[in-house]
Image: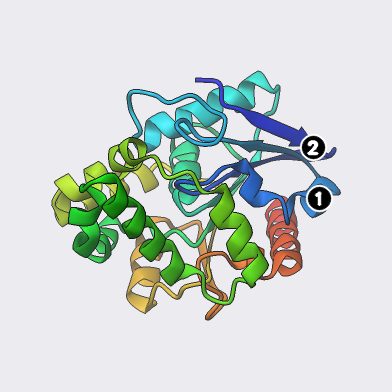
Amino acid sequence: MLLAHDRAGTGTPLVLVHGITESRRCWDPVLPMLAERYDVLSVDLRGHGESSAGDAYDPITLASDVVETVEAAGMTAPLLVGHSLGGVVVTAYAAIAKPRAVVNVDQPLRRADFKAALGELEPMLRGDEASFQTAIDLIFTAMNGPLPADEVARVHALRRADQQVVLAIWGTVFDSTPDELDATVGALAGSVTAPYLSLHGIDPGDEYSRWLSRLLPTATIEVWRDQGHYPHLVQPTRFVERVVDFDQLRAHA
């Protein structure tokens, strides 16, 4: 599926992938700075923003849409930057295509841990529309961290939480065992050879860092402590500088 997208700037290609219930507009605070250095393609995942809904929402399907859109734009070997769900998608992209590097913003890949954290809210997420929306608000409010009030309001206004889409994406987490989830992630990440920056505003813990390092030897794990789920919006200038530095280090490696 070709995705709704915007393109800005000149330079080497960079692709931005947003999180669940969000859209490409969520990158607006960092987009102008990135566009000074890169040819930036920002996309709306299927079922989000201005993109059409689809029948499947597994990581490979979501990533395949991004690959198709990138190829249609004439881009090759982009730097991939994904936040939250977008972090899973860019990881899957790197498993099936050839980006030059990956930046995963605050998305731990260990789905078994995510299942445990999300489990208490599963009945609300599967309930009526009011219960579902309350659960979504609880999830994201808890992760805002030091995000400024105006940014909280902006991101909230952009959020479009479609229950059918969210449950299609998270359904596998609910319906699989922890071992099945870890095996799926292992198979996916095991195919990734690109340089990989795992940047967290919420500390995933030392055990997770050791797990990811074993699973994905190309990964650099970096924690910006107490910055919440949106470190790129809490510190946009620092974030852009880190992306550029990571890309340049990769180029000279």
Give how far across and how far down residue 106 sits, in percent.
49, 62
Quarter of the image for the C terminus: give it. bottom right
Please tell me whether mark 1 sits on a helix, a strand or a loop.
Answer: helix
**Residue under the point 60% across and 61% down:** 153
Give how far across and how far down residue 215 sits, in percent.
35, 57
- The earlier-in-sequence mark between 1 and 2 is 2
Give how far across and how far down residue 232 sits, in percent.
64, 63
Measure how far apart labels 1 and 2 are at the Cα level. Answer: 8 Å
Left/right of residue 252 with respect to residue 10 in the rendered view: left
Label disc, if present, on residue 32 of the rendered structure: 1
Pointers 1 and 2 in contact (CB under 8 A)?
Answer: yes
**Residue under the point 23% across and 43% down:** 172
Left/right of residue 41 with respect to residue 166 in the rendered view: right
Q: Which quadrant of the view contains residue 214?
A: bottom left
Give how far across and how far down residue 85 sits, in percent.
44, 49
Label disc, if present, on residue 8 of the rendered structure: 2
